[in-house]
Each structure stands twice: as structure tokens, then as C-alpha cells.
Image (tube, rainbow, N blue to C red):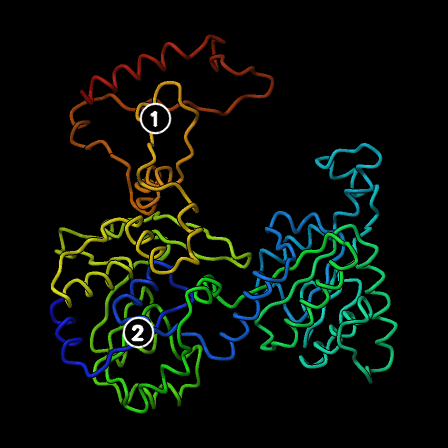
Amino acid sequence: MQGAADILRQAKKTIGIGSPRASLESNFALRELVGAENYYTGIAQAEQSRLALMLNVLKNGGVHTPALREIEDYDAVLVLGEDLTQTGARIALSVRQAVKGKARAMAAAQRVADWQIAAVQNIGQHAKYPLFTTNVDNTRLDDIAAWNYRAPVDEQARFGFAIAHALDSAAPAVNDLADGLNKKVDIIVQALTGARKPLIITGSNAGSEAIIEAAANIAKALKGRGADVGITFVAGAANSMGLAMIGGGSLDQALEQLASGAADTAIVMENDLYRHAPAAQVDAALAKVNNLIVADHQRTAIMDKANLILSSASFAESDGTLINQEGRAQRFFQVYDPAYYDDAKKNQFTVMLESWRWMHSLHSTYTSRHVDWTQLDDVIAACVAALPQLQGIVDAAPGRDVPHSRSEAGAFAAPLQRPYRHARQHQRATSRVSRRIKTPCSPSRWKGTTARWPIVSRSRSPGRQAGTHRRHGTSSRPKWAANCVTAIRACA
């Protein structure tokens, strides 16, 4: 850490590039290290604009965003511009369950329980709730879709705006639609207005703000008609919404800072820049960098140009918080302890920390002060103090001050819900899953003895009952027990 701190002290200007696949805590620690004005999200400008638009709809649109389980209860679904099987596989599964909900509803009307699947399928006879999709190509949801529209992204957006205008005349109108699309618009409008709970799904993966706006207009129009409508957005990475809430400069701005020479040192955390920007643009920017520090848990091409590489822990080896597509904070807990990778016999020891620990340790060394973030709760408290919009992450899971045993909570306390401790209890067993834990008996103990482990033959002659001796018809259990005693004495 002292060498890394010396690099920062000698730098003219240091910028930090975060990542949408890193936790909120890690991105905040990087932001604290380089300063809010020098922090960049690591997301392209166009994508960041789409995320800001989706976040604005979630905050101010007034339309409910369902959880994955709630999606299964909707009875009409419109997907605009997203290939859900590729961009949100778990959402795609919920959509499939929603489409099958019509058969369950028909069975429930005849008082048939959901678990009687054969009866449900017999009653439903392949009946499905309506699903409409738009995409540039075929998708794996086409087999259950009532209709799928394949067209360029801009045409899909126009089609979405036409649906919104048909639902609400105050919405922007669309002229010169392709032949036959007006009839399809009428069919979709009838399906959405006739549904008990219609759902609109879109996202940023189509690369179009217009599609997001069209989906928002449709949801707003349905809500104006009094429908119990829901809207779901699909982001590009696990914590894209979290970075949209934190804010910061875009990756384009960061590369411009480096290419122009305004900044000569960069810290890249859990981000493969070549996945978010053209290779020529990244190479031109990194060629002007004097010092590059990379922290990641996987090998990336940018590491070949790094002066210092910090081995960070993956999501399975660390604790942290993400913001999902609902705008809801989700906490993940450590399963594997990196110390189990150590091999004392070969003198190999792993130095692997969470990214927020690396950033805070570097910050403490750089400013010559003691480390004061020792637990995840410490980082969360500092994060909430600096970014009040993230206040909700405190309640994502119980803190470390919550008792994890009945004795700590009191004899008459209610059953405790402590996922953090629950994950810790299973940590050792999970981290040793690949190790051999069998303790074989030494062969030397058996030398010079005639005892052996009893072998019980399971072969039977035709007509002979189990538990009888082959010749005399008597039970072999006493003989088997005697062999066990002899074997145990030999091992003692």
C-alpha cells in the first residue's frame, strides 16, 4: 500500500473509474479516495443517459415496479426491444409463468389446486395469457408469444408510441406506420385494456431512449385508465441502477481526461474498459497514463497495461449491496473465505480483499491515518452520510449489532432472522466442498490380523427370503455383528 500511496502522491491528477458490476460500497470507497469530482462510473455516456431516464421513471412515474415473483401474477405482457432470455433470464422465466397463468385461473375456477399440474394442463388445453414482443430478431419467447414484431429499433419505438397514443389521445401521435400495424396496435390495446394487470417490460439493452419513453407513455396511459399496470426495466449490469443513483462522470469523460493529459494516473476498479468503449479509444487514453492501478477479481485485457494489480474478492468472497432493476437494495454475503486457497506446505498465501477494503486501505495510507472501516456496516454508514439517496441500503439486511443467537436475544425472544450469520455458518462447509475429508484407516493396523470388515452379500436365490442364511435358513446378523466387533478391536 505504501508504494501505491507514493504513486498517488506523485501524480498530477488521479481519477477513479468504477464499475456497474461492483458493489455500492466499493464504488463509494473509490469515490472517497479520488474525490467526487474525479469519480467516473465506468459506464458509456449513452448508457448512462438511458439509466438516468429509467431511474426518473421509477422515481416519478407513479407506476408500480413488480418483483420477480409478482411478475407471474400479470395477465397481459408487452415486451419492447428486449430479448429477455439473453438480458434478463430470470425475468423471462417469470414471464413464462405469467403466460401460463390463464390455465391456472381456469383450473381455480373449477376448484382445482395449482399443484395438480396434470389436471391444470388438461383444463387449460394450452390456453395462455397474451404476450407481445418486439425485437430486431427472433427471441426464445416467440414460442409463447401471441405476436412478435421484428423491426429496427427506431421502428419498434414508433410502434410503442402508436400504442400509447391509441390508449391516450394526449400522447404523441405516430403517422405513416407500416401496412397492417394499425390492426396490430388495436389488438394489443384491447389486450392491455381488457387485462386485470397489464405489464410493460423494456430496458437499456436496445440502445434507445425512445423505446424507454414509449414504454413509460404506455404505462402512464394505462394508469390513467385505472388499470393496475406495472413496468419493469432491464439494465445492463447487476448494479447499473446503483451507479445511476450515486452519480458521477461517464466513461467517455474519463477517457477524455486521460487522452488530453489532464489526468496522468487512473484507478480502474472491477471494470474491463474494452467492453464499454471502442478499443482504439481506450488504447489512446491509456497510452497517455503514467500510472495505472487495477483492482479486479478476474483477468481482463487492461491488466496488461497496469503498473499495479490488486486482487479483489468476487461477490462469492465478499459482502456488499446492489440496487436491482426494481430500485431495491439487495445484500449479498460471503460464501467462500479466500484464506482457504492458502497452501502452507507450498508457502502460498492468498492476499485477496474486497475492493472497498483495498480502496480504503490505500486512502488511509495516502492520508497517513488509521483504517476506520473494519466492517461492512462502517462503510454503509459513511455511504449513507455522504449520499442520502442511498438511505434504504441500511435496511437491506440486519446489521452486526443484531443478536444471532437465542441466548443473546433473550429466552422469550421471537425467532431471529439473521441471513449474515446464516451464511457464515455454511461458509466452512461450502468452501471445503472440493476438498477430500475422508479419514482412511491406516493399513498398518490390519497387518498381522485375520479380521476384516464384514461384507454382506445381497445376492439371493430365487424364492429365498431376505434375512435368511443361504444353507440353513438362519439369520446371519449375529455373525455379522461378531465380525464388526473383531474389526473394531483390531483398529483400537
Q: Who's the residue at 81% across and 82% down the image? A: 177
Label 2 element class: strand
* Label placed on residue 84: none
Give the class, few, some or many, for how many residues have Cα within 10 Å of label 1's Cα (few <14, many ≥20): some
The N terminus, quarter of image: bottom left
Give the class, few, some or many, for how many residues have Cα within 10 Å of label 2's Cα (few <14, many ≥20): many
Q: Who's the residue at 74% across and 56% down the image? A: 198
Residues at badges 2 and 1 in contact (C-beta under 8 Å)?
Answer: no
The number of numbered discs placed on residues in the rendered structure image is: 2
Q: Who's the residue at 25% across and 20% down the image? A: 487
* Label placed on residue 16: 2
Q: Who's the residue at 18% across and 75% down the image? A: 8
Q: Hey, which quadrant is residue 34 in on the image?
A: bottom left
Closest to the observer: 353 or 112? 353
Drawn side of residue 21 relative to residue 206, left or right = left
Q: List x then y, in percent, for residue 442.
A: 19, 32
Q: List x then y, in percent, for residue 257.
A: 33, 86
The C terminus, quarter of image: top left
Q: List x then y, in percent, for residue 320.
A: 36, 53
Label 1 element class: helix
Give amino acid for label 2.
Gly
Q: Which residue is mark 1?
A: 409
Question: Eyeballing the image, is 442 above or below 46?
Answer: above
Drawn side of residue 481 relative to residue 56, left or right = left
Give amino acid for label 1.
Ala
**First reached walking from the N terminus: tag 2 or tag 1:** 2
Drawn side of residue 480 relative to residue 135, left or right = left
Closest to the observer: 181 or 327? 327
Q: List x then y, in percent, for residue 288.
A: 27, 89
Q: CA distance from mark 2 to mark 1?
A: 43 Å
Q: Hey, which quadrant is residue 192 in on the image?
A: bottom right
